Image (spheres, rainbow, N blue to C red):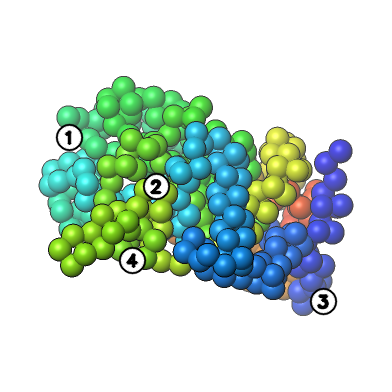
Amino acid sequence: MFNPNEIREQFPILSTQVYGKPLVYLDNAATTQKPRCVIDAISEAYCTINANVHRGVHHLSQVATEQFEEARRTVQNFINAPHSRQVIFTRGTTESINLVASSFGNSFLKEGDRVIISTMEHHSNIVPWQLLRDRIGIEIRVIPLLPDATLDVEAYRGLFNERTRLVSLTHVSNVLGCTNPVKECIDIAHSNGVPVLIDGAQSTPHTKVDVQALDADFFVFSGHKVYAPTGIGVLYGKEEWLEKMQPYHGGGEMIQTVRFEKTTYNELPYKFEAGTPDYVGAIALGKALEFVQQIGIENIARHERMLTQYTLERFAEIENMRIIGKPDGSAVSFLVGDIHPADLGTLLDRLGIAIRTGHHCAQPLIDHLGIPGTVRASFALYNTREEVDTLVEGIKRVARMFA
């Protein structure tokens, strides 16, 4: 049986008090808390196997390398990638997208070529393409939203032309909490001969990801949103693209031979992993994914959907409550009357409730919606209905103050 109260005991930080109140942590879309097994994995790695990976013949280096590569295989299994060599470790979703923008862009794009993104993208899936546009003159086209703030798929179909080279699309909006029809979007793109990058930062912690079933050409996510440390993430790519793409960074490990006249590059995935990797972070990411697998991603998804539905039901009790978008996953964005999001967030914090306010690194979406920002409550496997009740009572209390 899925028991969030038992799961909570594995997260030391959840026993924290804030301003004398029990912590109610509802900012999981920004980052999740870490279970004891992940914290212990970091400590154990530094205490028992710390040595640079791949290039050492001594025992510690070999054991560290084995655990680093085992973590890669854990990621492969978690997202159902065909081969572990298609799993590239990065610092997170942002670096993964920048890697594709730089390497794919330098390899396949030229002035006048088109990249399609959507109105609801995080800045990390907007700015890298703008940098590429400023550097080589590509064109960025944006998928509009329907009046209910969902993706306009029919308008998306019309954005393709003979010079469209890539689609880069979020799986789940970090603001709206809605799941995009990415499989349909991938199929549409592939029917036009165009590859697709999926930003899975907000989907990977909450739902089963199968990159082969999606047929995604690239898929990216961050470790820190799925109970792993910060500074570690993943880029999955189809071999047909990764083999042809130029390296992102130059240095050690990504080479086969170096001469002043010419350098030849290493095989996948090391071609894209220059320098000493965060092997301790990768090992901890593997442990975090094993933790999720032990609980069951289906159980987690069911629990979080229940919390979202319960939140929407309880929010109906609050006067002047406005839900932003059509949340169907693990995050709910909202506004209450004329209360500024920052004011509401600051006062809820005094009650021990941690939520996120502002534009959520999605300013074009916030501008499109014509609002100053939102308040966002986002859930993880350790959140409870009682915490939702605490949030609702806190909002009511703040609303009475402003009334």
Vertical relation: 191 (above or below) 387? above
Name which residue type carries label 3: Gly
Q: Between marks 3 and 4, how big is the CA–CA gap?
A: 50 Å
- Residue that numbered label 2 is attached to: 268
Q: Quadrant of the C terminus?
A: bottom right
Vertical comparison of 162 with 243: above or below: above
Give the residue at the far bottom of this rendering: 19
Residue at image position (44%, 29%) is 215
Q: Label 4 near label 3: C-beta < 8 Å?
A: no
Q: Which residue is mark 3?
A: 20
Dot 4 amino acid type: Gly
- Spatial CA distance of label 4 from label 1 is 33 Å
Q: Do the CB atoms of the residues marked 4 and 2 lie less than 8 Å apart? A: no
Quarter occupied by residue 206: top right
Question: Which residue in the structure is indicated by mark 4?
Answer: 251
Under circle 4, the secondary element is: loop
Task: Identify the secondary structure beneath mark 2.
Answer: loop
Q: Nearer the viewer, residue 148 or 399?
A: 148
x and y percent of residue 51 in the render? 57, 70
Label 3: how many Cα within 10 Å (few below 14, some 14–19, many 20+) = few
Spot occupied by residue 303 in the image (x, y as percentages of width and height): 75, 40
Residue located 57% across and 45% down the image = 73
Q: In front of the other: label 3 or label 1?
A: 1
Name the secondary structure under disc 1. loop
Marked residue nearer the N-terminal end (4 or 2): 4
